[in-house]
Amino acid sequence: MSSSFGRFLTITTFGESHGPAVGVILDGCPPGIAVTPEVVQRDLDRRRPGQSAITTQRKEPDKVEILSGVFEGVTTGASIALVVRSVDARPADYSNLKDLFRPGHADYTYWMKYGVRDYRGSGRSSGRETVGRVAAGAIARVILDGIGARVQAYTVQVGGIVAVRRDLAVAEQNSVRCPDPDAAAEMERAILAAREAGDSLGGVVEIRAEEVPAGLGDPVMDKLEAACRKGGAVFHATGIDPDLVSDRVVPALTGMCTDISSLTLQENWDSTYTAAELLGMCGFGMPPREAPLPRLNSDFGHSTEIDCYHGGDVCDREIITCNEAAVGEFFIEPLKAIFGV
C-alpha cells in the first residue's frame, strides 16, 4: 500500500482513523526553513473537526508535535517527523460494522484488495489520514512563501448553490469558507437541512495559486497540470478538473444518499453497485458521501441494515485545507527541480 509521494520532498503519512495517532514524515526538506509548531498548527486548526454544526462532530484538538528535523526554529535538513495524537478515538462505535460493508465507501474494495480491513472508521481510508498531509502542506507553504508564491482554496459550490463573487478576504470568515457571503449563508442552511434529513451534499472547491514562477513542469510526461490533478485526486472521495470555469454548475452534487443505499455482494464476491456509485465525480471537490444518518442496506446472502452515523460529515469542508496542502506540496517538486528551492 502506498503511503508516500514526492521525489524531492517525500511525504509519508501514517496512522488510522481511530488509532492512537496520525502524522507524517517529510524527507528532503531544505535546511534553514523557519518552522515552528505554531506554523503547522495554524493549518491544522483550519482543518480541525468539530468546529461548527456543519462538520463532523468528532472532538479532536489535533495538537502537533515536532519529533525531529527542526532545531531552534529552523529545519536541519534531516527527516521531519510530525505527530498528532488522537483523543476522541472511539473504535467501539464501529463494532457493528466488523462483518459488514458500508455502501458508497472503501470498505469492500479495501477488503477485496488486501484481505484485511480496519473497520474502525475505515482506518487508512478515513479523512483523518489527511491530518498528516495538512501538516506537511503547512511546511510546503513556508517554502512557497520564500519565493512569494501563495495557494488558497475556497468553496464555490455546495449542492446546487453556486458562489458568484470571489472575495477571498471573506472566505475564512464563514464556516463553509466561501468567498461569496450570500452564497455562504445559503450553503450553511443547505448543509444543516441535509443533516436534519439524514442526507449528504457534494461540493466544488476552487484553488488559486498566485505568483508562481514561469517554467514549472515538463511538456510531456511531467506537466504541471498532471501534478495538480494528482495533488487533488489523492484525497478520498475527490476528483479534479483544472478546466472548471467559475460559472459552471457541476451536476449530481445533491442529496444522493437514496441512490447509494444498497450494496449487494454475490456468492463469488463480485459486487453490484448502484449507478450513482459508478458515476465518479464532476469538477474538483467531493460527491455526496454515504448517508451519515439513515440506516443503509448491505446484502451478503441476506439483507442487513447498517447504522452509518458515527459523527461523519454531511459535506466535507475539511477538504479545502487539504487541497491547499496537496497543491502546495506538489508545487515543491518542479520548483526544486528547476530553481533548487
Image (cartoon, rainbow, N blue to C red):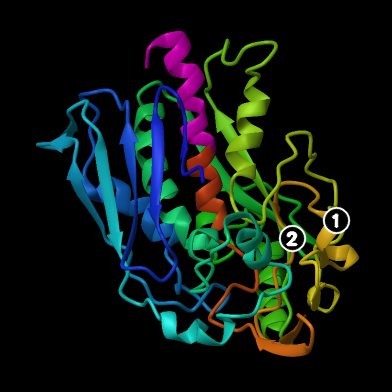
Q: Nearer the viewer, residue 335 or 245?
A: 335
Image quadrant of residue 327?
top right
Q: Horizontal and vertical percent for residue 71?
A: 11, 36
Is 21 on the left or on the right of 204, as rendered? Answer: left
Q: Is residue 96 above or below residue 35?
A: below
Which residue is farthest front? 268
Query: In the displayed structure, does residue 135 sit left or right of residue 83?
Result: right
x and y percentages locating residue 269 in the rendered image? 76, 67
Whether residue 170 is visible here, answered yes or no, is no
Tell me which corner region of the image, top left, top right, bottom left or bottom right, holds residue 197: bottom right
Q: Element under label 2? A: loop
Secondary structure character of the magenta stretch overall: helix
Check disc 2 and report the residue beneath it: 287
Identity, as a three-letter code, of the amino acid under mark 1: Leu
Q: Amino acid at mark 2?
A: Pro
* Nearer the observer, 327 or 274: 274
- Report the residue marked by disc 1: 279
Looking at this rendering, what residue extends furthest in the right direction? 275
Residue 196 versus residue 233 in the image, above or below: below
Is 328 colored magenta in this rendering? yes
Please give the label number shown on residue 302: none
* Image location of residue 47, percent across then percent down: 45, 59
The residue at the point 66 percent across, 75 percent down is 101
Residues 161 and 13: in front is: 13
Mark 1 and mark 2 residues within 8 Å of each other at the beta carbon: yes
Looking at the rendered structure, the secondary structure element under dot 1 is helix
Please say whether residue 189 is visible from this viewpoint.
yes
Magenta span covers which residues?
A: 327-341
Name above or below for residue 147 compared with residue 312.
above
Task: Say which label, 1 or 2, has the lower sequence index.
Answer: 1
Please tell me whether residue 120 belongs to the stretch shown in magenta. no
**Which of the image's four quarters has the C terminus?**
top left
